[in-house]
Amino acid sequence: MILLDRVTVIYPNKTVALSGASLHIQPKEFVTVVGASGAGKSTLIRLLIKEEVPTSGKIIVGSIDYDTIDKSNIPHLRRKIGVVFQDFKLLPNLTVYENVAFALEVSGVKNTEIKRAVPKILQLVGLSEKAHHYPGEISGGERQRTAIARALVRNPKILIADEPTGNLDPKNSWDIIELLLKINRFGTTVVLTTHNKEIVDALKKRVITINRGRVVKDEKVGKYSL
Ligand code: ADP
């Protein structure tokens, strides 16, 4: 569960990035967040992974109240929330397999467990054949699959996909959306931000529209209307 209650973020330069934003996302939902550039989407994502703190308002994710979370618990929180970005953010000198394994190594997972988990997740995202390729040797769609595998391998409750298709052609974009839907069917909450009207309208899922830091629309079966 993700709960934002009247959250306002004012940056030090006085920009109001979010203004009294409230939303409630249930476990296992698939939600798309849309908004023009500068509307506040990235700020919302940074709040959820606790890279930003609200100026006022309350945030609760799962059973964690962001006001009272202990600093030592932040890594645990970030493991519960996987994030993928438009530009993939893969390590270029590591293979697909190593990029995914690295996410587990940094969390102190044992080698035997890494060897079990990584092939499984690469199979889920359809990348078993490319496991030993470097990011420079695979397509954009495959890079995004690698990034999704890396986020998923830690078994997050929530997957945030921030413009995951922004650098992809329509075919690869749809493949990534299909993959997100599959992950969601397996029980992970998915929060997608996108500027792709065709995708939002075809999904027929919940759409939260942000405009100038405010939630201006929240529809169960939403359309892209900016
Ligand atoms: P979006 O992701 O929808 O494009 P952002 O959350 O990045 O929107 O930005 C919301 C508003 O906050 C914009 O006016 C942006 O210029 C401003 N902003 C974002 N980050 C900062 C920052 N670190 N300092 C000051 N202003 C910022």
Image (cartoon, rainbow, N blue to C red):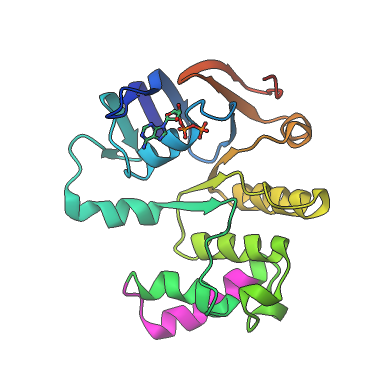
Q: Nearer the viewer, residue 1 or 142?
A: 142
- Tally of numbered tags: 0
Q: Is residue 131 above or below residue 125?
A: below
User: What residue appears at the point 36 percent right and 23 percent down from the top-left corner?
Assistant: 15
Residue 130 visible (yes or no): yes
User: What residue appears at the point 60 percent right and 50 percent down from the top-left corner?
Assistant: 86
Residue projecting furthest to the front: 13
Which image quadrant: the C terminus? top right
| Main secondary structure type of the part rendered in magenta | helix
What x and y, as percent, mark residue 199? 75, 37
User: What residue appears at the point 44 percent right and 63 percent down from the top-left corner?
Assistant: 154
Q: Quadrant of residue 130?
A: bottom right
Ligand 1 quadrant assignment:
top left
What x and y, as percent, mark residue 194? 64, 37
Q: Is residue 188 above or below residue 211?
A: below
Q: Quadrant of residue 133?
A: bottom right
* Relative side of 63 to 174, left or right: left
What x and y, as percent, mark residue 200? 71, 32
Q: Quadrant of residue 204?
A: top right
* Relative side of 195 to 118, left or right: right
User: What residue appears at the point 76 percent right and 29 percent down from the top-left corner?
Assistant: 201
Q: Is residue 98 above or below residue 63?
A: below
Whether residue 118 appears in magenta in the rendering, the answer is yes
Residue 128 visible (yes or no): no
What x and y, as percent, mark residue 8? 33, 22
Q: Nearer the viewer, residue 170 or 17?
A: 17
Q: Which residues are magenta?
A: 108-122
Q: Nearer the viewer, residue 68 or 38?
A: 38
Whether residue 29 appears in magenta in the rendering, the answer is no
Which image quadrant: the N terminus? top left
